[in-house]
Image (cartoon, coloured by chain):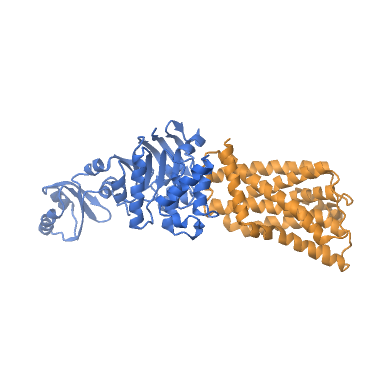
Amino acid sequence: MNWKTFGAMLARDAHVARRNAIQLILQTFLQPLLFVFVFGKVMVSSGFLPEAYKSLLLPGIISISMVFTGIWAVAMPLIAEFQWTREIEDRLLAPISVGWIAIEKVIAGMLQALIAGLVVIPLAWLVLRPGVQISIGSPGTFALILLLIATFSACGGLALGCTINQQHIGLMFGMVITPMIFLGCTYYPWSALKTFPILQKAVLINPLVYASEGMRATLAPQFAHLSIAAVLGALLFFDVLLLVVGLQQFAKKAVS
Amino acid sequence: MAVGIRTQDLCKVYNSAPPLGAAGGFVARADAKGAKQPKNQIPALDGLSLEVQPGEIFGLLGPNGAGKSTTVGVLTTRVRPTSGQAWIGEHDVWKEPTKVKHLIGVVPQRPNLDFSLTAREILVFHGAYFGIGSRARSERADGLLEKFKLTERGNKMVREFSGGMMQRLSIARAMMHDPQVLFLDEPSAGLDPQTRILLWEIIREYHQAGKTVLLTTHNMEEADALCQKLAIVDHGRRIALGAPAELKASIPGGFVLRLRFGNQTPELLKKLETLAGVREVRAAEPAGVDVYADRGGSLISEIANLAVSSGAELSDVHISEPSLENLFLHHTGRSLRD
């Protein structure tokens, strides 16, 4: 393992992220904040939704912001760099084994996802207050779940970014991302699906469900939620699965 | 200490279309041979063995799709061979890829510059990937920008660069960590003559510092001007090897007269062989004759007279002086440009 090379690659990604900061900030925060404003503020203050919805919505918004920041941060550059600009070749020729280059991408994506999650909490809280009832009961569990969600998002980005063809990006959004968001228990708790028993079982293959329910369990435990053990177990499973698949796909792309 | 390159019986069969940059012309060749090969099986290298001495400028010459880029890909850890072995110095490329990557610098056929960075940052980050200290890489980047006449553009994003500027920067980047072996895949493709001369000067200078250079080209002039040793490759096989002068001397006679007659007969070919200075006569596809001889234009009047006396009208003549192009034609029956 060549730490100097690994550090230099991380520094490169941080440098590029700083250069594109405004674009990144808009891309990461505009949509969740608009969503929070419309559903948490407009709909609640006009009486269409109850006040308690604010506290239910916030954990979901945090998880969705983290997951899509991580996926986006890793997948989009990889799709372009492997298939179009080929600019990743510079790093593939650096004196480090190919697997570590993929790991570096994952770490960079995790950091972006964690920053997105930690910034969106106060921002959304500012938009929604007063009347938001969230608290961090167990900081250790909360931190662990944040870390597992960040890992899942970055590993998911690696797997998708090394699998999807450039011409299929639109399809990725239509077939993967959109169903994942709407069936990811972000805007409603998993228990709300009990009137649709088949769907309630089916959505359990969606890792975003565990991210949203995990956030809800640690920030707003007053609502019914999946058990923390189930959330931790499932997120760990998806982290490992996506990392293994992602590394395999990356190796296939890196060497022909 | 200078480092050599060696390959033994390299074979590569792509199971899907090879990546664009790694193998420029293979797709065209796959189409041409598509009927013979199982679908999606694209052979690129067919038992290629090479030996490049430390400190040599070695050229791989061949038409598009000959396997040049795949050879470079195998030697630079980017294309895994189906069978065979490759070494840079004493390191097996596929057993010790990280050590090999320390020793090599690569200029790809298609620019692959980091579009998110400025020209100077590309060099500086490249230096950082190779563990060069902060001050040293900054100084070295400035030196290379100066050498490649890019100083004024150093702080510009490379997406605004012209093709020639990108190519210059690619070469500067490959030299940034001062590699022992420099690979250049079609380095002068798309360059204007002035930049090409600058490039040749830089390659010679790099070689004089005791470094090994392997370049691929389908430009005979470039191979002739730069390389101490050449391998001519076609269909993934080596068809000739030697110094440019030796290779040219190995063509019978040296001159090639490509002739076309209105009414070509076997008797005519036999008569052509009897002319003074003619070394070899070959029927060429689709209808024509290649005459290898030790003289060129002075043979034409005799050939024309012979044609008249045989009742065959001479309709086209093309005379080539001794060149690597003729060598390729002699070995394959095809022109490099075909």
The picture places residue A52, in percent across and down from the top left corner, at 89, 58
What is the letter of the orange chain?
Answer: A
Q: Is residue A84 left or right of residue A173?
A: left
- Which chain: blue? B
- Which quadrant, please, contains the C terminus of chain B? bottom left
Up-down: is A45 above or below A201?
below
Q: Residue at x 72, y 53 (%)?
A: A116
Would residue B279 appear left or right of A104 to someone viewing this image? left
Up-down: is A127 above or below B4? below
The residue lying toward the viewer, choosing from A146 and B127, is B127
Residue positioned 46% across, 53% down in the render: B111
Q: Quadrant of residue B303?
A: bottom left
Residue B144 image position (x, y, % from top left): 43, 48
- Residue B237 visible (yes or no): no
Which of the two residues, B188 or A249, is positioned nearer the viewer here?
Answer: B188
Image quadrant for the N terminus of chain B?
top left
